[in-house]
Image (spheres, helix red, strand yellow):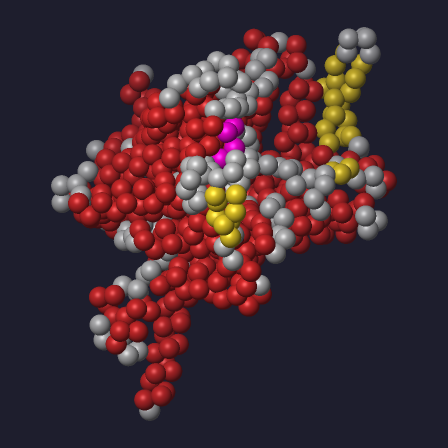
Amino acid sequence: MSKGFGSKIKNISDTNLLLTITIVVFFLMYIGAMIFQGEGFLKPQALFNILNANAALIILSCGMSIVMITGGIDISVGGVTALISMCCAVYLDKAGGNVAVSVLIAILIGLGFGLVQGFLVAYLEIQPFIVTLAGMFFARGMTTIVNTEPFNVSNEAFVALKNTRIIVPGMGSVNRLGNYVDAYVEIGVIVAILVVIVMFCVLKWTKLGRNFYAVGGNSQSALMLGINVKRTKFIAHLLCGVLAGIGGFVYFLHVGSGSPSHASGAEMNAIASSIIGGTMLTGGVGNIIGTFFGVLSLSTIQNIVSSAGLDQAWWTGITVAAMLCLFLVVQSVVMAVRKKGSVK
Amino acid sequence: MQTNETKNAGVSGFFGRMIRKQVMIPLAALLLLFLFNLIMDPSFFKIELGYNSAGNPVLSGFLITILDSGSELAILAIGMTLVTAATGGQDISVGATTAIAGSVLLRVLCGTNSRPETLQAPIIVAFLAACVVAMLFGAFNGVLVAVFKIQPMIATLILYTAGRSIAAWINNNELPVVSDESLTYFGEFIPGIPIPTPFFIAVACMIVIGLVLKFTNLRLYTQAVGINENSSKLNGLNPVFIKILSFVILGLCVAVVGLIKVARISTINYSVIAKDIEMDAILAVALGGNALSGGKFNMTASIIGAYVIQCLTTTLYKFQVRSDALPAYKAIVVIVLVIVSAPVVREKFNAFMAKRKVKEAA
């Protein structure tokens, strides 16, 4: 039996193997939480709350995964999110603008960052980490230049949009008073799920998506196959920028305020989610569905940590880092073992 | 860019050779900044001898500020240069590990009481404890990079996230305050000496690393590993050890920085201590003209680079730029810097210059 199982494992591609690990880990964790923590995790709303709080992270992580699949990285997404929140907040609240234009502003800011960073990385061949590190500091600095003080947005149309709840039929539960409460998700979740589906299709079935994998896997052979490596990298960063724009607005929609400290560490969570979701740092391996489950795993473990009474702020940082470390090492070991196996 | 490549340089003799030296890159930047300040406001160069609140003679002025607060950066630049050269990546956890080192230092100095009347341990013991812990964390980063082959920036991202949390956890999230005077000697002034102590500490570190580079094979081995890991292995080096060693040395630098940072304020603020210093340290290495992708390095250039960065920061502060807006300006400097030093841009520039030369000849 073990032999059959072993050969089956060898036949799975790297992407699918890491994806399987992620999904299994997520379900084990969630079921574990249901058993040991009970109460909160048993209601479907618990899952929806995780989605509500992390819709923006899901979108950011999708962009991050795409860049990582091409072998790059983008650590500016958190800063961009903060900048977008602040700009939209100032525009809506102080200039009395309308919501549709603010969406446009968000996407344009994201696009701007994507364009510049993509150009520097792809055409000037500067290390993506340095470029996006500078991008992150620039975005954070600009946020405080736009406005120093955190404030809430009171624009009516925006608040109405923010409070829109989409009821999920049949998932509601009975609360303590015996009333039936509908389960709901916010608009951001719908956007996030759309983004996941679209990006999944792009990566799986379009030429562009295949190019991403080819460039990340081995840019030399991709070049020899006639793929425009530079343009592919450029588009990956552009896409990541646009997704950061959308994600930034979804984040803004969730928190409804502008603040220089918004989304601090979001880039870290996005990278961690992608890695946990089975995207390899070396490029060429990864899957959007994995990233989606990566975000869920990360936030589930954060919820477990905080509901286990370890709610001092530092525990969250330490758990995320520990989990990231664990998955990095597991990836490294799994890949080393498989490499050895294939040589034999 | 290297001197030996340019023996047949067109620009006349000595001057041409000087201009192509790597040290010239940060020096030119420094000159530019000085020139800018000279034109805008010559009071930048004024140095005054005054007395501080304790009645000791102290020097003050913008130049002294640069020498003083640039010390931490210069010390970190030493370690960062080695890590960059050996691994081709950078350690972005230095700020967070500085918090850890400082936290350990205070924990040993204060014991369980967060407001002790007297020190619970000699400063040297506390410093050694901080060194050991910081080196252990350095080794942790090193193992991830060298053994598990994780990109340095990602591997150090782990401590970048967790570091400040760990630092807070070491002291149970309390903020111990040292009332003993002797700790401040390391961060401010020793009575009777008008030059700030951190500068002396930085100079001591530079002398140590200078001697190490002169009398050991560290430079050769680090460069060999950085240029080609596989061939260095075939030549009998142990790349894994060299890489971990570079991270451990950086850990030692971090511990020294932790001491200075804590001594400056006699306490610690976990979320603010050494904030964004990783960016400055990387910038210092880049400004020194060292390739961020590893290989050859020039320690002197990195250290001068560190002081240039500090000079830039001080200049920006002088022009009333708020501290939280500072990163935006520095980011622009980084981008300009990396664009100028990018191989592609340089190639294009050289090709352009060659074309012009051909035209002139014809």
Q: Quadrant of residue A330?
A: top left
Point out the image quarter for the N terminus of chain A.
Answer: top left
- Measuring from the top left, give residue B160's x and y in whole percent: 47, 34
Residue at x 43%, y 24% (from the top left corner): B104
Point out the image quarter for the C terminus of chain A.
Answer: top left
Residue A54 lies, with reference to residue B318, above or below; the image says above
- Measuring from the top left, give residue A336's x and y in whole percent: 30, 32
Residue A262 lies, with reference to residue B18, above or below; the image says above
Residue at x 72%, y 52% (from the top left corner): A104
Looking at the image, can residue B150 be seen?
no
Residue at x 58%, y 63% (from the top left corner): B41
Residue at x 43%, y 37% (from the top left corner): B191
- Measuring from the top left, give residue B235's x and y in whole percent: 13, 45
Of residue A111 and residue A42, the one placed in the foreground of this image is A111
Q: Quadrant of residue A171?
A: top right
- Measuring from the top left, give residue A129's x and y in whole percent: 45, 47
Q: Which residues are magenta?
A: B263-267
Residue B86 lies, with reference to residue B110, above or below; the image says below
A288 in the magenta segment: no
Q: Find the residue positioned furthest to the front.
A: B55
Looking at the image, can residue A159 be seen?
yes
Report the predominant secondary structure element of the magenta stretch. Answer: helix
Report whether A141 appears left or right of B240: right
Of residue B154 and residue A336, the one placed in the foreground of this image is B154
